[in-house]
Image (cartoon, rainbow, N blue to C red):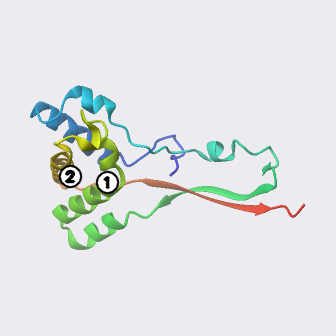
Amino acid sequence: MALTDDGAFSYEPLLDAMYASLLDLVREGFIKEAEVGRMVMPTVGRSRADFLAPFDPSGCFGRLKVETAEIFLGEDGIWAEYEQTRDAAAFGARWAALARASVFQSLSHGLEKGHADPRAHEFVTRFEKAVCERLARPPQRMTLPLARLAFSKADW
């Protein structure tokens, strides 16, 4: 995962939907504000400079040499499908399912008793439904900055 040229992590519609949904669960009394405060997503976006930081100005680190380092915008396949079908519910469901698979379990660690919390399964289910509904109204394309680096290894 990378950062855009202006330093943004992106995925704004998804992150906004997730945060608003967490606040809704707090307002409903299902989770506590302190629990949300303990929830973290173990992801970080990096700039081109961040990726190259361990390397000297010639692009070397130990026996590795950077051949190419580029930041590019990945294709939002879920958006492309939405443009074809105009099915907002399916758009929301696909992005919410992707988020569930990638970060919801990490977020549930913030619950009072972590994964052992009796609300853990219901938390994930309710959270996915809420995120799905928010993303569907109205659907927005995600900006997906990615990095591609190629290295060579010295034989010496």
The crowding category of the residue bearing disc 1, from other C-alpha atoms within 10 Å (few below 14, some 14 to 19, many at least 20), is some
Q: Residue at x 21, y 40 (%)?
A: 117
Can the viewer see residue 16 in this picture?
A: no
Residue 7 x, y percent position in the rendering: 51, 40
The residue where tag 1 is placed is 99
**N-terminal-most mark, 1 or 2:** 1
Above or below residue 43? Residue 146 is below
Residue at (50, 45) in percent of width and height: 45
Q: Is residue 11 left or right of residue 69?
A: left
CA gap, disc 1 and disc 2:
8 Å
Residue 111: image location, x then y, percent: 25, 36
Residue that extends furthest to the front in the rendered view of this protein? 116
- Numbered disc total: 2
**Residue type at tag 1:** Ala
Tell me residue 118's x, y (percent): 16, 42
Residue where numbered disc 2 is placed: 128
Q: Is residue 58 left or right of residue 102?
A: right
Q: Give residue 120's quadrant in the image.
A: top left
Q: Residue at x 22, y 27 (%)?
A: 33
Q: Are marks 1 and 2 in contact (CB under 8 Å)?
A: yes
**Kind of residue at badge 2:** Glu
Which of the image's four quarters has the C terminus? bottom right
Left-right relation of 74 to 124:
right
